[in-house]
């Protein structure tokens, strides 16, 4: 079993935090988005994952590859890498996996998080598309059924961003394919014949070609589908994860603090003389002193002093002093310090 994880996007909607760190490697309560994805499938799939193929942008450095390799290692997964030189769409991104597109595998896009139950069956279908009910599907690809109101009826089409209401079942960017090579042929057909949807080579169009060629598709659901694509969405997702994964233990050091759960204090973090929470995530190695931090994320090795933070993100190795308003500070930047 393979995991194919396209993550070449630049994450422009979560800048400045994606200037240095690719969005899927941003941490949400102690673990990066892509680490959570790998862990989820290692837990729920009925067969072990043996390989993961990460599709990177052309400017992603060796440090990114090292981080992804380290994420795979505890699960005994071999990490491979492809490069999407130009962003030409989701089908084009998957094709960058090249020679690894054979056998069975999961394609999962690393821009959302999700929870799903164990007990998933991969039998009785050529492909499985994960879906979630949404009221307004115009921003998503959708699965269209023979009887739209019957969730058990046959899937007859996949449509990208329909402007008319033809389905409430949004495709959430997770697919099981029994034959990755079959998908690769259909995706290559789109490129060879310049077949685009919304100006790009769409994975949903390749899936639709498989469907029309007789492939049997079924759907699966998730218990939660969490968006991490914008700054407000990342904060919302952090709230949900802190609430779901809340424990009373903290891996860092708390001294003279008032803790209002749920909160997370990562390994090596030091928090002193501070009111922390609710919904505060203090990542590994961060230092917070003499402050109030709620509904915010302080990323690894950042420093917050004499500040009141609410609805804020403080980037890795950044510094904030004397701030009493929402801030969004990028990696290695400082606010309120005078050299």
Image (cartoon, rainbow, N blue to C red):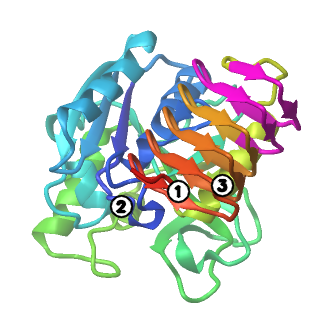
The spot of residue 230 in percent (x, y) is 54, 64
The answer to which quarter of the image holds residue 150 is: bottom right
Label 1 SS: loop
Q: Is residue 87 above or below residue 30?
A: below
| Label tally | 3
Q: Residue at x 48, y 52 (%)?
A: 337
Give yes or no for residue 261 being in the magenta stretch. yes
Disc number lying in front (3 or 1): 1
Q: Secondary structure at mark 2?
A: helix
| Contact flag, marks 2 and 3 (Cβ < 8 Å) | no
> Is 229 left, or right, of 195 in this rendering?
right
Which residue shows up at 58% across the image and 53% down it? Answer: 313
| Residue 315: percent from left, percent from top | 48, 47
Rendered residue at 83%/29% (across/down): 257
Is residue 303 found left or right of 73 in the rendered image?
right
The range drawn in magenta is 253-280
Q: Which mark is residue 203?
A: 2
Instruction: Give yes or no for residue 268 being in the magenta stretch.
Output: yes
Q: In the figure, is residue 24 to the left or right of 125?
A: left
Neighbourhood count class around disc 2 (C-alpha, 10 Å): few under 14, some 14–19, many 20 upward: many
Q: Badge 1, how many Cα within 10 Å: few under 14, some, many 20+?
A: few
Could you say which disc has been placed on residue 336 in the image?
1
Task: Determine the CA span between mark 3 and mark 1.
Answer: 23 Å
| Label whose residue precedes the other's in the sequence (1 or 2) | 2
Extreme residue in the front direction? 339
């Amino acid at each position: 079993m393979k995991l194919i994880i396209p993550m070449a996007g630049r994450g422009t909607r979560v800048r400045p935090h994606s200037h240095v760190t690719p969005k899927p490697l941003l941490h949400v309560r102690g673990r990066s988005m892509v680490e959570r994805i790998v862990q989820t499938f290692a837990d729920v799939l009925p067969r072990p994952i043996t390989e993961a193929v990460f599709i990177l942008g052309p400017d992603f450095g060796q440090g990114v590859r090292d981080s992804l390799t380290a994420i795979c290692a505890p699960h005994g997964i071999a990490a491979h890498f492809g490069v999407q030189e130009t962003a030409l769409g989701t089908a084009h991104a998957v094709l960058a996996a090249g020679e690894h597109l054979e056998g069975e595998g999961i394609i999962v896009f690393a821009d959302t998080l999700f929870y799903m139950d164990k007990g998933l069956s991969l039998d009785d279908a050529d492909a499985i598309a994960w879906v979630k009910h949404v009221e307004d599907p115009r921003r998503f690809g959708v699965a269209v059924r023979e009887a739209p109101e019957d969730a058990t009826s046959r899937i007859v089409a996949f449509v990208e961003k329909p402007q008319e209401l033809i389905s409430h079942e949004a495709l959430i960017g997770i697919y099981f394919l029994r034959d990755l090579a079959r998908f690769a042929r259909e995706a290559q057909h789109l490129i060879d014949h310049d077949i685009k949807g919304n100006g790009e080579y769409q994975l949903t169009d390749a899936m639709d070609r498989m469907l029309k060629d007789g492939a049997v598709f079924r759907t699966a659901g998730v218990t939660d589908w969490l968006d991490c694509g914008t700054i407000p969405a990342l904060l919302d997702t952090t709230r949900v994860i802190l609430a779901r994964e809340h424990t009373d233990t903290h891996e860092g050091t708390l001294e003279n603090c008032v803790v209002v759960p749920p909160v997370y204090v990562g390994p090596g973090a030091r928090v002193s003389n501070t009111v922390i929470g609710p919904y505060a995530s203090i990542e590994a190695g961060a230092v917070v002193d003499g402050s109030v931090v709620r509904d915010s994320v302080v990323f690894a090795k950042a420093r917050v002093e004499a500040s009141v933070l609410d609805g804020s993100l403080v980037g890795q190795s950044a510094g904030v002093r004397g701030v009493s308003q929402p801030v969004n500070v990028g990696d290695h930047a400082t606010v309120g310090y005078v050299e």
